């Protein structure tokens, strides 16, 4: 078995919105779309083709300020089989947080703790925030974002615009940050898989 403490090229948190605006059908599209992106050949080559030949991946589901669950803890991805297994777990994750408010700041605080507790050193640290609403509960997201960026973390976003057409502006002001950070948009959850594949390809390039 590979040593979990060996360095990796990337530590990536996939942070999914599980708030009330995300229906169970939409959550299924998030999970299946992300799994499909992880199975993409370009994404696989990017995750496994770095100096260390490995990455750490983690899956976080969040909604209100106190509603955050690590659905899949840090997992070392150092082979196509390990990546395939992780993608299968993502596709079948349960929605176990209450469908509450949208607390992005609290979610970023949880990501900060997860990164500090990561079981291996990484050349890059990244948070992948996907959701369909702006922060409306708990701590403001921008100060947490700024602290993470100061620590060298990159935060990217994927905005689903079916409820808030100007959500990208909010993400760019309050969520996204770090060297090379970006946010993508999709009109609705039926387009999520394509947008997530594009996002993952950019992140692991």
Image (cartoon, helix red, strand yellow):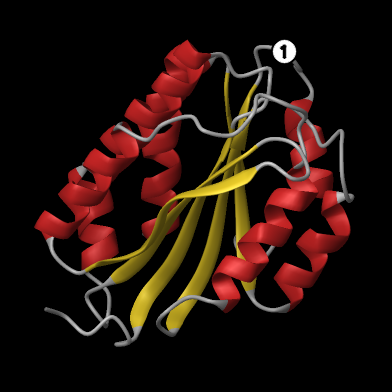
Label tally: 1
State which quadrant residue 193 falls in: top left
In this rendering, the answer to whether 33 lies above or below 65 is: above
Q: Is residue 74 left or right of residue 169?
A: left
From the viewer's perspective, is 73 left or right of 80? right
Residue under pointer 1: 163
Give the residue displayed 66% in from the left and 24% down from the top.
Answer: 99
* Residue at image location 73% in from the left, 60% down from the top: 109
Residue 67 location (% of width, % of height):
68, 41
Which quadrant of the structure image shows residue 101? top right
Q: Residue at x 69, y 79 (%)?
A: 151
Q: Nearer the viewer, residue 19 or 98?
A: 98
Residue 60 location (% of width, % of height): 52, 48
Q: Secondary structure at mark 1?
A: loop
Between 7 and 40, the residue placed more toward the observer is 7
Of residues 69 and 153, which is closer to you in this image? 69
Residue 180 in picture, x, y percent from top left: 60, 61
Quadrant into which the N terminus falls: bottom left
Is residue 28 visible in the rendered image? The answer is: yes
Q: Quadrant of the C terminus?
A: bottom left
Q: Nearer the viewer, residue 64 or 190?
A: 64
Q: Does 125 appear above or below 167? A: below
Name above or below for residue 170 compared with residue 53.
above
Q: Eyeballing the image, is 95 above or below 67?
A: above
> Does residue 179 appear in this view?
no
Q: Position of residue 8 (x, y in %)?
A: 34, 79
* Residue at (28, 50) in percent of width and height: 43
Bin the neighbour count of mark 1 within 10 Å (Cα to Cα): few under 14, some 14-19, many 20 and up. Answer: few
């Amino acid at each position: 078995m590979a040593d979990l403490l060996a360095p990796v090229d990337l530590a990536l948190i996939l942070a999914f919105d599980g708030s009330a605006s995300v229906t169970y059908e939409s959550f299924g599209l998030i999970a299946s779309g992300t799994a499909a992106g992880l199975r993409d050949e370009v994404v696989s080559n990017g995750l496994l083709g770095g100096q260390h030949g490995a990455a750490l991946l983690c899956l976080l589901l969040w909604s209100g300020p106190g509603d955050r669950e690590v659905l899949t803890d840090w997992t070392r991805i150092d082979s196509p089989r390990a990546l395939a297994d992780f993608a299968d777990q993502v596709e079948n994750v349960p929605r176990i947080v209450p469908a509450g408010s949208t607390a992005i700041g609290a979610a970023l605080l949880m990501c900060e703790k997860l990164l500090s507790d990561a079981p291996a050193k990484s050349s890059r640290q990244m948070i992948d925030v996907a959701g369909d609403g702006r922060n409306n509960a708990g701590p403001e997201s921008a100060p947490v974002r700024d602290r993470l960026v100061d620590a060298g973390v990159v935060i990217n976003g994927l905005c689903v615009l079916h409820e808030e057409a100007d959500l990208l502006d909010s993400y760019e002001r309050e969520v996204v940050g770090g060297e090379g950070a970006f946010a993508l948009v999709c009109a609705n959850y039926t387009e999520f898989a394509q947008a997530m594949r594009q996002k993952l390809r950019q992140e692991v390039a």
